[in-house]
Image: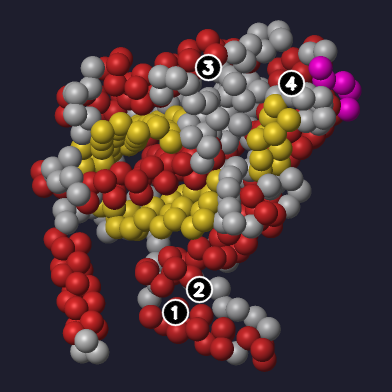
Amino acid sequence: MFHIVPFSVLLIYFISLAYISKTSPVYVVDFTCFKPPNCLRVPFTAYIEHARMLDFFDDKSVSFISKILHLSGLGEHTYFPPGLFYMPPKSGHKEAINEVHMILFSVFENLLSKTNISPQDIDILIVNCSGFCPNPSLSSIIVNKYSLKEGVKSYTISGMGCSANSLAVDMARNIMYTHDNSNAVILSTEILSTGWYPGRERPFMILNCIFRVGGAAILLSNKKEAKRHAKYKLLWTLRTQGAFDDKGYYSAYRDEDSSGITGVRLNGDVLQVAGDTLRTHMPVLGGRFLPLIEKLRFVRSVLMYKRSKEIYIPNFRRAFQHFCFPATGKSVVRETANRLKLGDRDMEAALMTLHRFGNQSSASLWYELAYLEGKERVKEGDKVWQLGMGTGPKCNSVVMECIRPILGEALIGPWADTINTYPLTIP
């Protein structure tokens, strides 16, 4: 038994390794992002004027809103859903469903048109939206609207915050490992109509100021013919959980204020929590993609920590050429870049997406990739790292490799009318 048990474990390990290596690679064929109509634009002056007219905001509340808007990194061309333009804002179920139809139907149809597939070609459907979870589910709404085939595997993800899209990609990848010759569509959005907070407590008011309308649709495939026209090959996904820690768990929390009004409360330590979650995530990701010299420098700094009191931050530019960070807010983007010792060029896509479209939750990562494609910076062979960080807290990574030249996206993507005006200097 002493010899048989270790031998059996090794045999199972190598058989599993051989099986995994034979699974079909997963490709990111293409994606689309929702571009709201100009009639939904919400400049700062209009936002503040409307806030003054609402009886549940006092002068201090309006002053706080103005301060957050000007410090957030958002620009003057972000968008609200139609329901929030009413006086007072309409945040009922009907408005939320209308917002779902406006966003998800649009990006889904654009994706079908762009990739030349039909609804019957879809084998897996994943829809993520953190704050709105109707019955029937969001995925059922899509299945019903477009008459997807009876055997489609449909899933709806809620409550995952800004990490939801990266989680959905990881989920689709795992499903496709056991389902060859499949197409998977991921739809990501955040419905703001039901997320509006009509109260005066500042920790709850921040999301009113920074979240904006947005959505993305992504087509994944493990079909052999997908390689010929896909943009990216999915290399790896990684998920880190931090909900076991109370400080992190309550840093962003859906709750009632002292008046019984429901909203999402952001605590003052959310930046520290994000940094701590990232710190536990990076060694695993770095161990997978960093060159050997960077790994050795990191290990050496850990061994010498008692003497030097410093831990070496590896140069992640040697592993990845492009970075898509959570566009949660200007301070979060810069704190993430600072933790990773990255420069202005590396966080440009996140800051410009935040300025142009606002915080669109997990869909923001694809607006950032659309920005990089619009600037024609993504070259064949380049690696793209998408980092999703959400409530819980959770930290999820998606790593892709560009497998063909990408040209002309500036003319058809969400940045079509503004790409030449960026980048801007954001103080």
Q: Which of marks 4 and 2 is nearer the N terminus?
A: 4
Point 57% across, 78% down: residue? 312
Q: Distance between the residues labelled 3 and 4?
A: 16 Å
Q: Residue furthest front?
A: 1
Give the residue type at disc 4.
Answer: Pro
Residue bearing mark 2:
314
Colouring chosen for the image of the structure: secondary structure
Residue bearing mark 1:
295
Q: Which of marks 1 and 2 is nearer the N terminus?
A: 1
Name the spot of residue 397 as percent of width and height, x first: 43, 54
Is the residue under label 4 in contact with that under label 3 (CB below 8 Å)? Answer: no
Name the spot of residue 257 as percent of width and height, x first: 78, 30
Q: Which residue lies furthest to the top in this view?
A: 87
Q: Relative to residue 383, is residue 160 drawn left or right?
A: right
Residue bearing mark 3:
96
Give the residue type at disc 3.
Answer: Ala
Magenta stretch? Answer: 56-60
Q: Distance between the residues labelled 1 and 3?
A: 48 Å
Q: Which of marks 2 and 3 is in front?
A: 3
